[in-house]
Amino acid sequence: MAIATRIPTKIPRTLVPRYLSSASSSLADQLPEAPSQPPAPTLDLSDTRQLFASVPTAALLRSLANLSTLAAGPIVDLAAAALRAAAAAPEGRFLPAAVLGVARATVHRHFCAGEGFEEAGRAVEAMWAEQGLRSILDYGMEDAEDVAACARNLEGFLRTVDMASSLSPTSASVCVKITALCPISLLERTSDLLRWKQKDPTFELPWITHSFPILCDSSPLYLTPSVPDPLTETEELDLRVAQQRLSKICHRCAEAGIPLVIDAEYATLQPAVDYFTYSAAIQFNHGDQPMVYGTIQAYLRDSRERMANAVDAAEREGIPLGIKLVRGAYLTRETNLASSLGVPSPIHGNIQETHQCFDNCAAFLLERVRRGSGAILLATHNVRSGQAAAAKAEELGIGKEDQKLQFAQLLGMADGLSLGLKNAGFQVSKYVPFGPVEQVIPYLLRRAEENRGLLSTSAADRQLIRKELIRRLATAVIGRT
């Protein structure tokens, strides 16, 4: 089928400050120290010759150069400032155009699969054919400022589903952001009302369509200190229309047999995002394998309780619940907001607590998969977490070919872990954003922040790539393997 090759490129001017205020956490994902015993055979990354067998030397050199540059804090700070300036500058200015050109040739090329649909499709097909890695396609639109923007974004997501359905079977799924389908202001209003409902169960929400638990007592309910006004008739209509947009995407995915992953957001919006997610899961998750996956961010203190409540509710209602488990991407935003309100942060106190929460949630979900309840997509760049989950799955007797257990990493990050899991026989996907540089600047800034500094999330990647390049050089020079 004919597929358009370009995507609308301009970020709405009113959204630039909000886009650029968000930064991800620098959650250090490093290789473990050398253990006293050999690593478990379930996942062994020590043999880089086997690990990177499908990756050309030129690609390894390019990745190492990009990741090493991103580990240099001053360079990242300068580049991030330039991207912010380029995004905020009037269209057509020479300097911003030059900045975007450099970004297109460097970070965009590293972390994204191209600017248009056809380019992204070729990248997905190549990754599937050469490395056996699946893709989670992310049409790079985030926040929508109004209903008109939501309608445009819907068309882009539908075209993404059509593109995914034209690729090799099972090679691609699709990701969607509710913030691109429903105006931010309405998501904030809906979240306020859902939080107040958690505070006062007698509080009536006439528009609510299901009773799935969304919040818990440990959730940051302080974000709604007073009784919010009810939704107006216009707001209720806009909320229903936004749900219809998501349903339209779900219908298209169901027809094509393509899973749909719904991303998480920050705490002020997440209750509404979960409301949309569970509504779609109830409507479209039938039989044994879920089609709609929601997202749990393990760096939140209430994540374990909210996840367990949702899983229990799904089991009671006989709905297979799909969950993507991540660490989280809005540490700075959440911490700054809590500080401005004079309340405790909703984030765990340190990275060790976040790691522990992720691993505990993963073990809980793997137990449910073993029982035949739901499915899990473990999105992690942490080698220890990957090894622990792989070993736990083997201990529980979960087959590596079981589609209810999948791993995922971002394109351009944790390639060693992705390939190691794939070589061990597990189902592995890369999260694959695409779109013009102007459109994906918020995403690129988050990736730059994650990789910034010597203890960045790319430390393990760089260590493995260097080891393999040294091995290849030694082989070429002296014939040693």
Image (cartoon, rainbow, N blue to C red):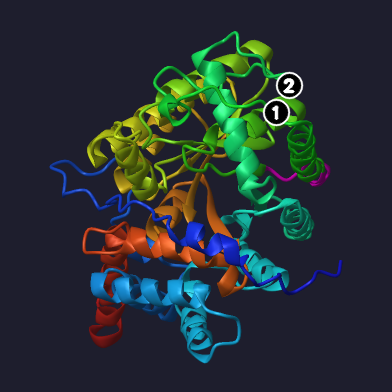
Looking at marks 2 and 1 on the same chain, the residue that comes earlier in the sequence is marked by: 2
Question: Residue 39 sits in which quadrant?
Answer: top left
Highlighted magenta segment, given as a residue range: 252-259
Q: Quadrant of the C terminus?
A: bottom left
Q: Is residue 95 left or right of residue 168?
A: left
x%, y% of residue 60? 39, 74
Disc 2 crowd rating (10 Å Cα; few below 14, some 14-19, many 20+) is few
State left or right for residue 448 relative to residue 272.
left
Mark 1 belongs to which amino acid?
Ser
Q: In the picture, residue 1 is in which quadrant? A: bottom right
Indicate whether 60 appears above or below 428.
below
Q: Residue at x 55, y 29 (%)?
A: 192
Query: Which is closer to the viewer, label 2 or label 1?
Result: 2
Q: CA distance from mark 2 to mark 1?
A: 7 Å
Q: Where is mark 2, residue-wise?
A: 209
Q: Which residue is mark 1?
A: 279
In the image, residue 241 sits, relative to residue 225, either above or below, namely below
Does the magenta segment cover residue 254?
yes
Magenta: main secondary structure equals helix
User: Are circles 2 and 1 on residues that touch, CB within 8 Å?
Assistant: yes
Total label count?
A: 2
SS label for mark 1 = helix
Most foreground residue, 84 or 223: 223
Residue 134 screen position, x and y as percent: 59, 54
State whether residue 374 appears in this view. Answer: yes
Residue drawn at x 60%, y 55% as measured from the top left: 142
Relative depth, front residue between 383 and 360? 360
Q: Name the image quarter holding residue 341.
A: top left
